[in-house]
Image (spheres, rainbow, N blue to C red):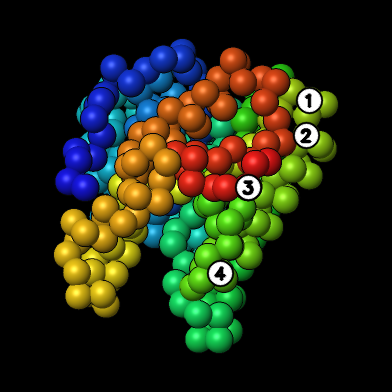
Amino acid sequence: YKRPYLKHEGRNMGVYDFSGKKGIVTAASSGIGRAVAQVLSSNGAELLISSGNEDRVSRAASQISQLTGNTVHWKKCNLKDPSDVEKLKNETVEKFGSIDFIVINYGDPRLDQFMNLEKNDWDDSINMFIGATVNLVKGLVPHMNLPGGRIIFITSSTTRQARETVALSGALRAAVVNLGKILSLELAPRGRTVNSISQGFFNTDRLKSIIERNAKNNGTTVEEELRKISAQVPVGRVGEPEEIGKLVAFLCSDDASYVNGTNIPIDGGSTRYPY
C-alpha cells in the first residue's frame, strides 16, 4: 500500500514523441489526474493542468515540470463551478491557441446510500460530470489541431459494475461514457478520437480514505482491508496511477488512431461483465 507515488519518474516514462503537442488535464493535482499529466509531460507534451485547490495544483505543476523538463501550466478550477470551468476553457484557448489532447478527469463525489443523498449532492455532481464535460468539449473541440485530436474521459468501473453507495459516480460517469460514444461517431470524420477509461482500485488518496473508513467500521487494520480489496482483483493487487497515465498516453498517440468510441476497463480483471 505504501508504494512510491510513481515508480518511474520523469523522462524515463517517455515512449511517444509528443513534442509540440499541447493538452489539458483536469483534476490533476494528485492521484490519477496527476499521474496522467506526469506521463504525458514525460513524453514531451506541453500541458495545462487544473484543480480546485490552488496550492496543490501549482505545486503539482512545478514538480512535474522539474521532473520532466517540460512546461506545465496550471489553473485553479473547481469542476463543480460553471464559472470556473468557463474560465479554464477560455484560458486554455488564450494560452495555447490550438490543442491536441483533452483529458477530463473528475473529482470524487460523495459516497453514500441513495436515500441519504441531498439535492445539492446531485446538483454539484451534475455540474462536475455533465456540465464541465459539455462546456470543455464544446468550447475546445473547435480549437483542436487537424487532422487528429484526442479526447479521453477518465471514469470508473462503476460504469460497468454497480456498487452500493456510488449512485452519484455510477449514474453520472455512465452518462459521460455514453456521451463519449456519441462524440466518437460525430467527430471521427475529421480524424479525432474519443474514448473513456473505467478504472478499478488504484493506489490513491481516495482508496486510502475508503480503506481507513472500512478498517474503522469493521474493527480491522488498514493492511487487512487492503488485502480484502486486493483479493477481489484477479491479478492480486491494486493498480498504480501511472498505469492509467500510460494508457492515456497510448490513446493520445498515433498508434491509437484506430481506437475510437471505446470504454476501456483497467482494473486487473475485476469486472466480470465480458464486454
Mark 4 or mark 1: name the one nearer the start of the chain.
Answer: 4
How would you rate the neighbour count of disc 1 (Cα within 10 Å): few for under 14, some for 14-19, many for 20 or more? Answer: few
Tag 2, which secondary structure? helix
Q: CA distance from mark 4 to mark 1?
A: 34 Å
Mark 1 or mark 3: name the one nearer the start of the chain.
Answer: 1
Mark 3 and mark 2 in contact (Cβ < 8 Å)? Answer: no
Q: CA distance from mark 1 to mark 3?
A: 32 Å
Q: Nearer the viewer, mark 4 or mark 1?
A: 4
Q: Nearer the viewer, mark 3 or mark 4?
A: 3
Mark 1 and mark 2 in contact (Cβ < 8 Å)? Answer: yes
Mark 2 or mark 3: name the one nearer the start of the chain.
Answer: 2
Q: Which residue is mark 2?
A: 187
Q: Decide if residue 185 is in sight here.
A: yes
Tag 3, which secondary structure? loop
Q: Which residue is mark 3?
A: 273
Q: Which residue is mark 1?
A: 190
Point 68% across, 41% down: residue: 275
Left or right: where does residue 191 sit relative to residue 86? right
- Amino acid identity at mark 2: Leu
The quadrant where residue 265 appears: top right
Q: Which residue is mark 4?
A: 168
Q: CA distance from mark 3 to mark 4?
A: 21 Å
Left or right: where does residue 107 sit relative to residue 210? right
How would you rate the neighbour count of disc 3 (Cα within 10 Å): few for under 14, some for 14-19, many for 20 or more? Answer: few
Point 50% across, 60% down: residue: 79
Residue 167 % position (x, y): 57, 71
